[in-house]
Image (cartoon, helix red, strand yellow):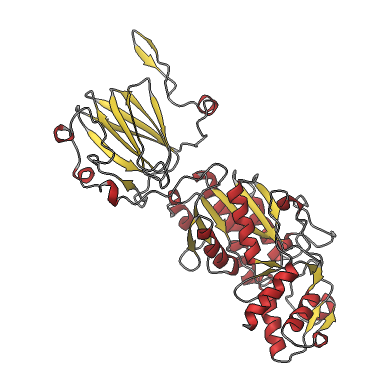
Amino acid sequence: MDLTLHGDNRGWFKENWQREKMVALGLPDFGPVQNNISFNDEVGVTRGIHAEPWDKFVSVATGRVFGAWVDLREGPSFGTVYTCEIDPSVAVYVPKGVGNAYQTLEPGTAYTYLVNAHWSPQARYTFLNLADETVSVPWPIPLEQAILSDKDRAHPRMEDVTPFPAAPAEGLAGRRVLVTGANGQLGRELMAQLPAAGYHPTGVDLPEFDISEAAAVDALDWGQYDVVVNAAAWTDVDGAETPRGRRSAWRANATGPANLARAAAVHDLTLVHVSSEYTFDGSAEIHTEDEPPSPLGVYGQSKAGGDAAVQAAPHHYLVRTSWVVGEGRNFVRTMASLARRGAEPRVVADQTGRLTFTTDLAAGIIHLLATGAPYGTYNLSGQGPVVSWYDVARRVYELTGHAPDLVTPVTTEEYYAGQEGVAPRPLVSTLDLGRIEATGFTPGNSMERLEAYVATLEA
């Protein structure tokens, strides 16, 4: 990129980085957060080849350099070399994962670069030896006559380089994914599906990583990730109504997502957050994405608080779901266990909705990322008939070979009569799926999914 120098007898002035002009030229709005300068006394100072996990916009304040860049990202462009001479009238945009190197051609050279992530000693770099024979950079000053650091001399040759994870293809939100709550039902499913979809997931969970601890979130090396999927939550609906549970629910469901939203904004990440139909009071026949929150209890209130924070992140998907079933403790597994023991449970018949299996929930999240769907809020549950918990329980009894009449229908009021500390429940949990289906994703029929799931429990 050529930069205009405005000079007179006093010297010169230039606009080194001007966001509006750079974006108009087709460069990404990469959000620089740090400006670095490397001053070099002598001719022949040679630095690199370093591929950092952030984008750079490099230029020269004074002097002149020979610049060399080697694509160290995985993919067909791996090993591609580009070189040019940089003086104050030239600037180069360098995507993350592309190795950067330069050699000074004049004494007193100041090499400058804007980056869109704060430097961290924990950041992982990809390196290539300056003298690598494969790329064969045509250094103006032979390396045996140049000034190099011992560390740069020791960098690996191309055959020993571990490629930097590929930059996302057009339409993808990113490939390096941090999954919070990785040990939960959804987290485990995401960790299974993401690699198969071409992503590189890293899973974290309590007690090693707590999203409600601002210091821990801030200290994480976010340069290692493109996307964070927040599958962490406090889900003990009744426990949230206790004094201790109230604090825990708000920490996990509101403070934690707020910390992640701040990190996503600062580090230009895509944030995926999983919400709940408990943010509504259940008075509507079907809940759309645009329905304003009206939570009945502490759990729903804390989830609504987290949703509000997430919606402030520039690049976010807020995925609202209901009645989640996956690997772990859940209603279906409980009913199957009761059926095997010959129990005769009382199950509420006036709460209606659709089950959501984590296979569909994880697949839907990956679909949003992979297709580059517009950011915003999406409902995502199973498809098919609207049923009650009583209907689900009867069907589980049938599928396990037990009489469905052993299940007795009751109202929510009857079920909780005489119990204290019970959280209010929305009676209608049905979610409108039109928005996510318009992106090309159709979840499975929840009752068909139920049949397949129970078969795995029986096996």
Q: Position of residue 317 (x, y in %)?
A: 63, 51
**Residue occupying the point 69% across, 77% down:** 332
Q: Is residue 7 left or right of residue 437?
A: left
**Residue occupying the point 23% across, 34% down:** 46
User: Is any part of residue 190 visible from this angle?
Assistant: yes
Q: Is residue 447 left or right of residue 369?
A: right
User: Is any part of residue 416 visible from this angle?
Assistant: no
Q: Position of residue 47 (x, y in %)?
A: 26, 37
**Residue occupying the point 71% across, 64% down:** 322
**Residue occupying the point 34% across, 52% down:** 162
Q: Is residue 235 left or right of residue 211?
A: right
**Residue sitting at the far top:** 9
Is residue 215 shown above or below 45? below
The C terminus: image quadrant:
bottom right
Q: Position of residue 438 (x, y in %)?
A: 73, 49
Q: As rendered, which of 75 and 423 lies closer to the eye?
A: 75
**Residue sitting at the far left:** 145
